[in-house]
Amino acid sequence: MTDHITIAIDAMGGENSPDKTIEGISHHLKNSDNSFYLIFGNEKLINPLIKKYKINSDKYKIIHTEKIIEDTDTALGAAKKGKDTSLWLAMESLKKGESDCVVSAGNTGALMAISKFVLKTIKGIDRPAIAGIL
């Protein structure tokens, strides 16, 4: 077991992103000394927010992409947007063992569809689960 957790963040998902997402990271860091963030999204939009919220450079890495999934996309439409979206890349990081979990405030249907495409499901389980209680 490691002494830190790496969290893949879909910075472009959800309303008021990436601002609210980066602000959320800053709040989490106040209570968690052992977190590192892989932040997936448009670095031109993210970098000023990193400065605004004073996030230390040793706590994150930005993986740049300009492709995003909109809240209005269908689950299948989101999956068809491809492997260069912030959500898909975040999910790939989990599959490759580069992160310990994925967080997205974006399109839930897209999150479920992409997680099924990228991570697959356990034998005998047809649908991915949504964590209801943490």
Image: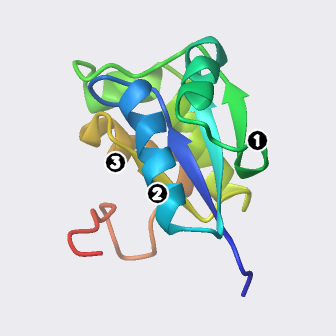
Q: Can residue 42 be seen in this view?
A: no
The answer to whether residue 53 is above or below residue 52 is below
Q: What kind of element bears circle 3?
A: helix
Residue under label 1: 57
Q: Nearer the viewer, mark 1 or mark 3?
A: 1
Residue at image location 54% in from the left, 24% down from the top: 49
Q: What residue type is labelled 2?
A: His
Examine the rendering and report whether any part of residue 73 can be seen.
yes
The residue located at (65%, 70%) in the rendering is 34
- The tag earlier along the polypeptide, 1 or 3, is 1
User: Which residue does the numbered mark 3 point to in the structure image?
Assistant: 112
Q: What residue is at 27 percent from the left and 20 percent from the top? A: 73
Q: Categorize mark 3 by other alpha carbons within 10 Å: few (<14), some (14-19), many (20+).
A: some
**From the viewer's perspective, is residue 93 above or below residue 17?**
below
Circle nearer the N terminus (2, 1) = 2
Query: Is tag 2's residue or tag 3's residue first in the polypeptide sequence?
Result: 2
Q: Nearer the viewer, residue 93 or 77?
A: 93
Viewer-nearest of labels 2 and 3? Answer: 2
Q: Where is residue 26 in the image (x, y as percent from the top left)?
A: 50, 46
Q: Which amino acid does label 3 sit on?
A: Met
Q: How far apart are marks 2 and 3 (CA)?
A: 24 Å
Please, which residue is most extreme toward the bottom here? 1
Tell me the quadrant of the picture where the N terminus can be found. bottom right
- The residue that label 2 is drawn on is 28
Q: Percent from the top left, x then y, of residue 106?
A: 32, 35
Which residue is at 79% across, 49% downward?
58
